[in-house]
Each structure stands twice: as structure tokens, then as C-alpha cells.
Amino acid sequence: MYIRPPTRRPRRWPWFLLILLLLTATAYWYVRSEGQDLIPLPGFLSGQRPTPTPTGISSREHMALGDRFFANGKMDEAIAEYRRAIELDPSNSTAHARLGRLLTLRGRYSEGLRMAQRAVEIDSENAENQAILGMVLDWNGEYDRAVEACLKAIDLDPAYATAYAYLAEAYADKGRLEHALQAVEKALSIDPQNFYAHRNLGYILERLGDSEGAIAAYIEAISLQPNLVYLYLSLGRYYRAAGDYEGAMAQFQKAIEVDQRDPTAYDSLGLVYFDQCDYELAAAQFKKAIEVDPEFAAAYGHMGWCYYAQLRYEDAIPQFERAISLGATAIEYYYELGLCYVYINDCERARPWLEKALEIDPSAQPALQGLKACEGK
């Protein structure tokens, strides 16, 4: 027997839901007819998806992102996050300090110093702020002030290993190698994994003439933080100073592999070619440094060196001037700029630069010779 399948009864909306929809639509059209726009049509009637509300990221969260980027060797991203942290909270002293350190590692010494000084202005009782200021002052050639800031950091936090590491480098730059060795040993006794301390131990041992110890310390620093360009540059600089150009170039190439946007790596590689009088290859690397960071002062100065060595004085002049305008303070830039003008018979423009060089070092012979050449002109 054929049995007809049961018929499905259509679903009906509950009467109260129909009334609710009717009342909602009536209220909406009433408000619109009165010229008001206070009650938006509900999403399920308008057919529109609700717009998600953006959630803000705090200054401290941007700073934490910056820290993570820095740990992974992403310096540009880290710098951007620290800047955002400062934009959101100008009183965030730690963001200022860490930004100052990164800018200094990137070779932007003047800007790095401004940031580190601002950090201490905001909070002078923060040990990290004082330690980073010490490091930045040291890299800016202000060794006495660097030692003072690092000692202040240690007074604030006697267990802060990085402060001792920075103090060690400043002592080494002052030629107080015994004090430097004591400071770095203290840093390592507090934190044996501190890569700043291992790097600065290598720097001190290098100054003490312990080649094997220096190389081992630099390599240990790299093993602890393989994503930081300046550690490779430190070892490469050692090889360059020792005349091992192949070893230096290998380290600088590794630095470029770690971060292709770091101008200091290209600049360091260019200096190796410059040492070997290969000015064309040197200039190519300096140009790459400028391309990745148009405000990297050292590369302009080094480009000026290339042109100066090739007797291309008119080409060298704008390079030296740009380096100085960006905050470079190397005395060679001043007197070589002055000499460039001397060699193109423009003593009027030469004198101010030669005199500035003598303000930096009254015994600078090239500057004295340049002024003598301009006598009576």
C-alpha cells in the first residue's frame, strides 16, 4: 500500500516577534521623518555587518613590541614601535632611552644622544636610563660623562649587569683598562649570559693585546644574540684593525645578512675596500648605506674620503658638508673639507672649516698647513 509521506508544516514566526519588528520599523521611520538620525536601522534589517570597534594599543604595549623586534634583529620595526610609544606617552622615559640606544647602534649618534638625555630628564632615578645614557655618551666620545652616568646607574641598582658592561666600555675608551676589566667581570658575575658584557670583554681584551681572548669573547656575544648587527661589526672591526680583510669582510657580510637595512654594515664593508685603496668598490658600499638611511652621517663623510683620495675635490665638498650638517664630528671631515677648498683656490671658504678643525684639535697639522697655504690670499 502506498503511504503518502507526511507534509511538513511551514514554520510561522511567533506573533510577538512580528509585533516587535513592526514597532522597530515604525519608530525608525518616525525618527527619520522628523529629520533626526539618532536611531540607526538595526543591522539585521539594514543588511549591513556591524563595524568592529578598534582597540587602542598603549604606549607600554608598543614598547614591548619594540623589545621583541629588537631581540629578533628587526631594528627598523623596533625603532618605529619605540617612536609610537613616545607619541602616545611623551613621559615614557624607558621608550626614549631604548630608542636612543638603537639610534646609536644605527650610527645616528646625535639623535640617539638627544633621546637618551630626554629619558634622564624625565626620570633621572631610573638605572636603565642612566646606563643607556652612559653608553650613548661613550659612543659620542664623551667618556668622562659616560663614566659618570654609568656609575649613577650602578648606585641606583647595584645588581644591574648591563650598567657595569657599559661602564667597562667607557673605562676602556678612557684607557683605564684595569678598571674596565674589573667592571666587565662584575657584569659577568651578575649575568653570565649578558651579551653586552661579552662584547665589551672582547673590546677590552683587544685593547690589552689578547687576540685569542678577544675573538672568543666576540664570538660568545654573537652566540648569545645572533640577531644583533653590531656584534658582527665588532668582530669584523677587530679583524680589519688586525689587517685580516677577508675575516672582516666575512663578518660584515654576515651583518648585512642579518639586517639588509642597517647602514652601518654597508659602511663598515666600504671601509675595508677603502683601506685597500679600492675606492670604486668602497664608494658603492657607502652609497648603499646612504640609500638605506639618507641621514646616516658617517657614510657621507666616508664618501668624501673616497673622492678626496681620488683628487675629486669638488665632488668631496658636498659629501663632507652633508656629513657635518647631520652631526658628524670627526675632525678629518672639517680639515679635509677646508683643504678641498684650498685645492680649488677658494681660501675664503676654506678658512672657516680649517679654523673649526683647530677648535677641535689646536695641533691638527693638516689644518695648520691649509691655513698657511692661504696666507696672503
Image (cartoon, rainbow, N blue to C red):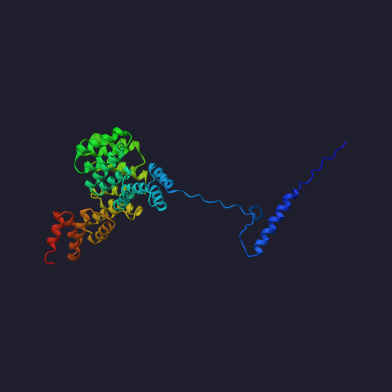
| Image position of 53 (left or right of 81) | right
Residue drawn at point x = 67 percent, y = 61 percent = 29
Foreground pick, 301 / 312: 301
Q: Can residue 371 be seen at all in this image of the molecule?
A: yes
| Image position of 62 (left or right of 299) | right
**In the figure, residue 148 lies in which quadrant?**
top left
Give the quadrant of the N terminus. top right
Residue drawn at point x = 30 percent, y = 45 percent = 130
Task: Give the percent coordinates (x, y) of residue 262.
Answer: 34, 48
Q: Can residue 245 be seen at all in this image of the molecule?
A: no
Task: Give the percent coordinates (x, y) of residue 288.
Answer: 33, 52
- For residue 350, above or below residue 256: below
- For residue 350, above or below residue 105: below
Total count of labels: 0
Foreground pick, 172 / 121: 121
- For residue 71, above or below residue 301: above
**In the figure, residue 173 lies in which quadrant?**
top left
Give the quadrant of the C terminus. bottom left
Task: Give the percent coordinates (x, y) of residue 107.
Answer: 30, 50
Task: Give the percent coordinates (x, y) of residue 266.
Answer: 31, 49
